[in-house]
Image: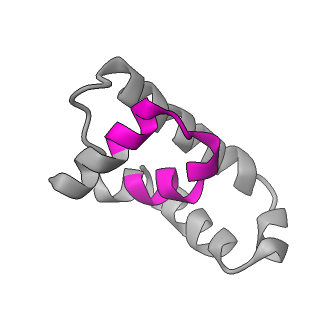
């Protein structure tokens, strides 16, 4: 997760109006896609970094399956 992704995440967390920032959705969705690909590549062992978890948690409503639940659990247990 790049510094740019984290900056955009902080901006959009400020409220719905900030989600209208140009490219914000694309930047965050691209980061989320990379995180999810990493989880899917090692669904029983992948542990997200703190920054990955920030992005993943922001979009948690998009991933409500057992793989996502296990990934979140591994993050908190490590």
User: In the rendered image of this protein, does residue 65 appear above or below residue 13?
Assistant: above
User: In the rendered image of this protein, does residue 75 appear above or below residue 12?
Assistant: above
Instruction: Check if residue 60 falls in the magenta segment.
Output: yes
| Percent x, y of residue 27 | 64, 48
Q: Along the horizontal axis of the image, is 10 left or right of 19?
A: left
Q: Along the horizontal axis of the image, is 7 left or right of 51?
A: right
| Percent x, y of residue 21 | 80, 65
Q: Along the horizontal axis of the image, is 72 left or right of 12?
A: left
Instruction: Check if residue 32 falls in the magenta segment.
Output: no
Q: Along the horizontal axis of the image, is 64 left or right of 29?
A: left
| Percent x, y of residue 56 | 49, 50
User: In the rendered image of this protein, does residue 11 appear above or below residue 6?
Assistant: below
Q: Residue at x 37, y 58 (%)?
A: 51
Residue, far front? 66
- Magenta: predominant secondary structure element? helix
Q: Residue at x 18, y 54 (%)?
A: 77
| Percent x, y of residue 39 | 37, 30
User: In the rendered image of this protein, does residue 29 appear above or below residue 34?
Assistant: below
Image: magenta residue range: 53-71
Of residue 67 and residue 57, the one placed in the foreground of this image is 67
Residue, far top? 41
Of residue 42 and residue 17, the one placed in the foreground of this image is 42
Q: Residue at x 33, y 38 (%)?
A: 70
Of residue 39 and residue 65, the one placed in the foreground of this image is 65
Q: Residue at x 34, y 40 (%)?
A: 71
């Amino acid at each position: 997760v790049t510094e740019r992704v984290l900056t955009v995440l902080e901006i959009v967390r400020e409220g719905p109006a900030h989600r209208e920032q140009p490219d914000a959705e694309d930047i965050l969705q691209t980061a989320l896609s990379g995180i999810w690909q990493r989880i899917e590549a090692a669904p029983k062992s992948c542990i997200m970094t703190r920054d990955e978890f920030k992005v993943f948690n922001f979009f948690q409503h998009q991933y409500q399956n057992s793989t996502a639940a296990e990934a979140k659990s591994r993050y908190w247990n490590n």
